[in-house]
Amino acid sequence: MNSLLILFANNILPIFLAAGAGYLVSKYLGVKPRAVSRIAFYIFSPSLIFHILTNNQLNNSDIFHIAGFTIASILSVGLVTWIIARFLRIQRPLLVAVLLTAMFGNAGNYGLSLNLFAFGEEALAYASLYFVTAAILTYTLGVFIASLGSMSIKESLVGLLKVPMVYAVALAFLFTTLGWTLPLALDRTVNLLADAAIPVLLVLMGIQLHHTTWNGQTKALVLSNSMRLVGGPILALGLSVVFGLTGTARQAGVTEAAVPTAVMMTVLATEFNINPSFVTTAVFTSTLLSPLTLTPLLAYLGA
């Protein structure tokens, strides 16, 4: 028990304290999440992704394994959740809300910082690849699920082109393949922004959580939280064998698959009117419950 408390205090508590600062700023100073979210989305996150991918020692095999593992993890959670939800007779649009909140975890705000604290810089590189792949799925498959098929393939692709992290990944691969480096001034700028990304994302998470609202739908909420916090890591442990992930790659991938529901799901739910009150409740409750599942998971993974 002592070791679990130490794991929690060293790796998870800092995340909640930083998010708590954002929560208090939002509550007492009236800071709204949209402005901070857009800055993080368009400036800090792409800088972090570019910096990590151009300063790591991962080879193409690592990249493809992590990307495949990420896709398989998210889709497998969605499939199992859909089967259970149908058995429980959960109807649309609540079924769509359950799928969104179970499939897509907070791989950026929560997952990147947790991997950095628990497993170090190497794990952060693997976690970033998971984050980028999950983000692409969020803005394609996630948008498609939220829209219930009302959005065309063309519109989905156009939406993907608006995601700055996609360009950060493309540029990073171009630079690493051709052996290019940024001019010193630009390199230092990117490094500064990258260093600020994780703190900003954590504060943003607290700001966004302050704006969540409680909701009923207990049966659906239990399913969503269970699949996100328990089903996700169990399926990921099995898939890590299938994709041959070992060592730090396994630690990072399984940890990312176990984080609470992505705050971004509240944006999709609001945009498409997919039970936003339920989605925000799922985000809030899964985040509060996450230390109970992540602390023993970190111990199992050897943090």
Image (cartoon, rainbow, N blue to C red):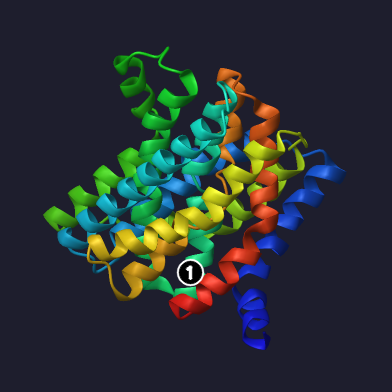
Residue pushed farthest left? Answer: 178
Please tell me whether mark 1 sits on a helix, a strand or a loop: helix
Determine the residue positioned at 29% across, 46% down.
169
Q: Give the image location of residue 20, x and y in percent.
A: 75, 57
Q: Residue at x 76, y 43 (%)?
A: 210
Viewport quadrant of the N terminus: bottom right
Is 228 in front, or is 27? 228
Q: Is residue 199 left or right of residue 104?
A: right
Seen at 34% across and 13% down, the residue is: 152
Q: In this view of the protein, can residue 180 be seen by the observer?
A: no
**Image spot of residue 189 (x, y percent):** 43, 54
Residue 221 on image: x %, y %: 65, 40
Q: Amino acid at mark 1?
A: Leu
Give the number of callouts.
Answer: 1
Could you say which quadrant of the image residue 289 lies in? Answer: bottom right
Please, which residue is most extreme toward the right here? 28
Can I make out residue 65 in this image? yes
Between 249 and 229, the residue placed more toward the observer is 229
Q: Position of residue 242 (x, y in %)?
A: 24, 61
Judging depth in this view, the residue of 137 and 189 nearest the camera is 137
Q: Is residue 261 above or below residue 300?
A: above
- In the drawing, does residue 106 fall left or right of residue 288? left
**Residue on which disc 1 sits:** 116
